Image (cartoon, rainbow, N blue to C red):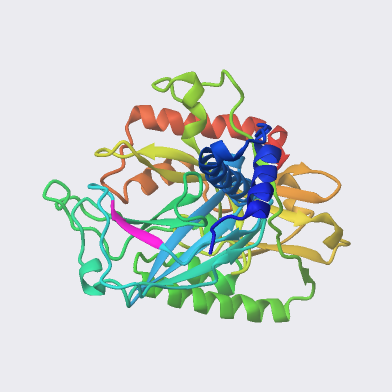
Amino acid sequence: MNSFDKDNLKNIKAIFMDKTGVDLPSVGPARRRSVRRIVVLAAAAACFLIMTAFAAGMFSSLSGDDLSFRAVYEGNGVVTVEVENLSNKDLRFQPRLRLMRWTTGEEVEPHSNGVIFQNTEIPAHSDGAMTIDLSGAYDVEQLEEPLDNDWYYFILTNNNFAFGQDWICNVRFADPLETPETSEIPAPPAESDAAVIQRVEEELRFYFGTISWDTDERRAMDAQYIEAYTELFDRFDGNIVPSVSPALLVDDPAPGVILDSSLPSDEQYLLIGQHRHTHDVNYKLMASEAESALVLSAELPLETYDAGTYLPLFYIFTYDRSQITGEDDHAFIHGQILSFRELEEYKVYEDDRYLCYEVSDLIYTDLENYARSFAGRDPHIRFDDQVWTRVKNIYGYYKENLGNLFYYR
């Protein structure tokens, strides 16, 4: 059977000329073989253009689509990846990944294709939890061995790891080993902010008064807290309005604003992190389990690597104003039930659809103690006078200008 008949050639030529604007002239029998080569190339070019047009409509950082990750190791090779889709497009991960080591950039080779993905679709402007089970493809015991000054990360994709459609997500399967230079540094005390706890509903103070770094303990405490606030809601004589997560973001610092003089002026925006979180820096739920805050953070540099970690500074909850109809409506934030009249002092933005409240004052009361306590948890974080000045500058800039920086994606 012929690969191409006359109709095939005619159709492919038409597609090629339509897509490229190049006119292919008619030729006689003497140049048939040459034309056939051109047409084959034309077919490939047409297919490329069609596939490129298709890919352009997919979720991609090259077209401004954005997301945020937080990976939590559940044990037995199972990882939960909390994903926030900040784009107008739906995000559909392929059930594929590459597991990498940070310091070497080398891939950890699986022994089979047995990785199981669940909940891979994250609709536009929503949060979701994707589950990845590695137990059928990797040596879980090996992954759970503590690493010395190193960690793993996933490369995830929604389009065959194409540039702009592959995504890096850090994951820790075990607490890191103590290095000799840090082994004598005592672990920082897990202290709560007493002034904050005094504001919390009395029956919920147990949750905020105890801080744990153990994952299993944190999950158990979350479960107790959810049960306790659910009972509190049932007894409460009023309406608890849940927060929402619209496509409402905070802009980068204005051109010319210098937050850290050690960086060029056109790189100042790199010092700001912007993500959605359900928990605060002490791994405490900031509202109900289904709610999240938009969090603005300051990057703190690491001593060893050209990288950093983020210190959350501003916690922003957003409410649909159509759901707030009277004095009986309240918000639940960081263990407190607050009327919207009480929240008025924290309001930083409003329009005809939404009300935004920046509630960091309900989460910590002293910026310096808060920042130094956070940095002190990890001996790899650099926190000298320069970094402290950076944090103060970022805090001061957004404290003064936050209300004028909101925009819709």
x and y percent of residue 264 in the render?
44, 20
Res 189 seen here:
no
> Residue at the left extreme?
180
- Residue in the picture at 49% in, 27% down: 268
Check residue 380 for magenta coloring: no
How many marks the image carries: the answer is: 0
x and y percent of residue 215 in the render?
37, 70
x and y percent of residue 325 in the render?
88, 61
Residue 261 vertical position relative to residue 352 in the rendered view, above or below = above
Quadrant of the drawing holding the C terminus: top right
Tell me which corner region of the image, top left, top right, bottom left or bottom right, holds residue 219. bottom left
Q: Nearer the viewer, residue 19 or 37?
A: 37
* Span of residues in magenta: 97-101
x and y percent of residue 163 in the render?
47, 44
Residue 370 appears left or right of 201? left
Check residue 99 for magenta coloring: yes
- Residue in the picture at 56% in, 30% down: 396
> Residue at the right extreme?
325
Residue 201 vertical position relative to residue 107 in the rendered view, above or below = below
- Residue in the picture at 54% in, 56% down: 196
Residue 57 vertical position relative to residue 177 in the rendered view, above or below = above
Tell me which corner region of the image, top left, top right, bottom left or bottom right, holds residue 405. top right
Q: Nearer the viewer, residue 288 or 49?
A: 49
Q: Main secondary structure of the magenta part?
A: strand
Res 390 seen here:
yes
Q: Nearer the viewer, residue 329 or 262?
A: 262
Residue 27 appears left or right of 77? right
Residue 211 appears left or right of 89? left
